[in-house]
Image: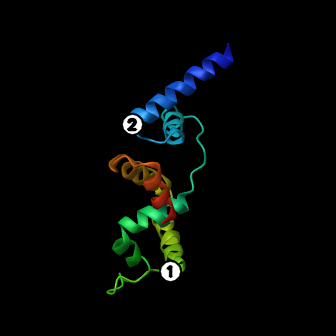
Amino acid sequence: ILEAAFIEIEQSFLELSRSTSIPVQQVINWFLKSRGWMTVSTNFWNIYAHSYFKDHTEQELARVGYKVPADGGSLGMSIRTKCYNLFKEAFPDTYKDILSVHDEVKMLSTSPQTVSQCAQEFQK
């Protein structure tokens, strides 16, 4: 009985993933989170370093007294690390929520991508 029910649940997640263009694992995580159940651990550093920082560069650099390079040059990982540590200090009780919401909004606001486009984005 359980195996048959698990197959139905899996099919529901797959259908929801296809209809929303949201990866299956993200659908499962959102489902678990919406029910207050344990979710797969989130790497908040990755969200910060590769998404939040990119979208709020000027604001985050101000935390460490830097400005966006005029030449558009790349910022080192050590600067991002300092910014991340100060970000966590500024929002000790809510930084995880801020990053989670940012990640969800970013995911929902992007247009569906092909597997190739996802792979290219992952390599950036």
Asked if 66 appears above or below 43 in the picture, the reply is below
Q: Secondary structure at mark 1?
A: loop
Spot occupied by residue 1 in the image (x, y as percentages of width and height):
67, 12
Viewer-proximal residue among 95 and 43: 43
Query: Which residue does the image show at 44% across and 31% down from the upper left?
Result: 16
Query: Which residue does the image show at 47% across and 67% down from the upper left?
Result: 87
Q: Which mark is residue 76?
A: 1
Spot occupied by residue 70 in the image (x, y as percentages of width and height):
32, 86
Asked if 104 appears above or below 88 in the picture, the reply is above
Name the residue tied to disc 2: 20
**In the orientation shown, which residue stands out farthest toward the front?**
116
Packing grade of label 1 (10 A; few <14, some 14-19, many >=20) is few
Res 13 visible: yes
Q: Nearer the viewer, mark 2 or mark 1?
A: 2
Packing grade of label 2 (10 A; few <14, some 14-19, many >=20) is few
Q: Three-letter amino acid code at disc 1?
A: Gly
**In the orientation shown, which residue stands out farthest toward the bottom?**
71
Viewer-proximal residue among 60 and 24: 24
> Which colour scheme appears in the figure?
rainbow
Query: Which residue does the image show at 39% across and 36% down from the upper left?
Result: 20
Spot occupied by residue 24 in the image (x, y as percentages of width and height):
51, 38
Q: Disc 2 or 1, which lies upstream in sequence?
A: 2
Direction from residue 89 to residue 3 in the image, left or right: right
Q: Three-letter amino acid code at disc 2?
A: Thr
Q: Secondary structure at mark 2?
A: helix
Direction from residue 89 to residue 63 in the image, left or right: left
